[in-house]
Image (cartoon, rainbow, N blue to C red):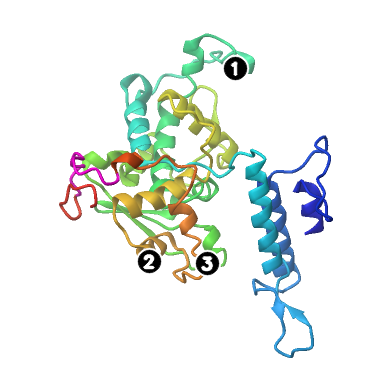
Amino acid sequence: MLTCHESCDSLNLDGSSKLSTKDRGTYGYAQKMRASMTYAFGKLHGLRNMHWHESEAGDGTMVGNPSISVEVSSFMCSLRRRKVQAGEAANSACAITSEILFKLHHYNHLCENWTIQAYQPGGRKPAGGLGTSKNLDCWGGGRVRRLLQAVYTVAFLCMLQFDEVLKIQVHDLRVEKNRVVLYLPFQKTHQNGDIKPFYLWVLPSDEAHICPARALAAWLQESKLTTGYLFRKVVSGDRIAEANSPMSSEQLLELFRNNLLDINIDPAPYGTHSFCQGGCEYLHVERCWHLRRICEWGGWSTEFTNMTIVKYLISSNDDPAEPREHFFNPNQRPTIKCRQCGRCCSCA
């Protein structure tokens, strides 16, 4: 951890402060360094993910992964505390909510946005993003917005990151009556296979904004794709690239942030992880799923020893579900009636 300490910490080993003019890495950079060391010791040197501890022989020999030790964890906690005290902003992504997805769905389905326009060669935007307000608003046509709606709903309801969604190919989908079955080719939680399929049923019309079956049907009908990657690169004129290569996470993130600007939402706090976290919060808060069911659906570990799922459910970056002053307010208005339990009280 000396390299991490030297690169990111504001203190020297003797406790004295470093010069303020010296560049230091962020807490996120320190996390990446630790993750790299954990991988190097665990995979490359065969130490796996065993906690760093003294062997049972009692001869002072240490065994396990040095990166997974009490000392390293203590350093990372103190480093984060010093970074926060120094004013470093949190770098974790905000979660996407069902309300935001509803607004995106409504805006993208407006006639002027959803209609497929004929390709017009030479109609490129000015270089560098300069031009009139109309130029800046026309960043994507009907095809791009159909693609985005499919990505949004799949990533949200299946709690996936963008790079996991972009690896999906057409043959990974099986269309059945009233549902689509998704067989993921890759998932970070199951890198050795044994990925359980996602059964995506057609949701009611009032939940169309989070319905992957509807969004996938609209995308497949328009794209006419029968083989290869499902979400391909987008080229000029709102056209889908003929080459069988997936869209990059960078391009998808740019399109997603442009879409957020359409509905007057600051895109800066949102990233490729926002849908995974948002879907988890949605299932727990709005669908009232218990933790084990969420983990089973997402293909996550159901051994709650480290409670990794908590970081998805509790994030300081997310907007509060309701104002703090209303927590015990006896005069709160009823909420939308839950289709699962039929209740409309705020505690449902």
Could you give the CA–CA distance between mark 2 and mark 1, rounded to whole angstroms? Answer: 46 Å
**Circle nearer the N terminus (3, 2):** 2
Residue 218, compared with residue 195, is above or below; it is: above
The label shown at residue 129 is: 1
Q: Residues within 10 Å of mark 1 (few under 14, many from 20)?
A: few
Residue type at mark 1?
A: Gly
Q: Residues within 10 Å of mark 3 (few under 14, many from 20)?
A: few
Q: Residue at x 77, y 59 (%)?
A: 1
**Circle nearer the N terminus (2, 1):** 1
The residue beneath circle 2 is 292
Between marks 3 and 1 in the image, the one whose residue lies nearer the viewer: 3
Instruction: Find numbered disc 2 in the image and state the secondary structure of the residue it sits on.
Output: helix
Does residue 332 belong to the magenta stretch?
yes
Q: Residues within 10 Å of mark 2 (few under 14, many from 20)?
A: some
Q: Is residue 223 visible?
A: no
In magenta, the rendered stretch is 327-338
Q: Nearer the viewer, residue 174 or 283?
A: 283
Q: Residue furthest bottom?
A: 57
Does residue 131 belong to the magenta stretch?
no
Q: Residue furthest left?
A: 342
The residue beneath circle 3 is 306
Which quadrant of the figure has residue 37? bottom right
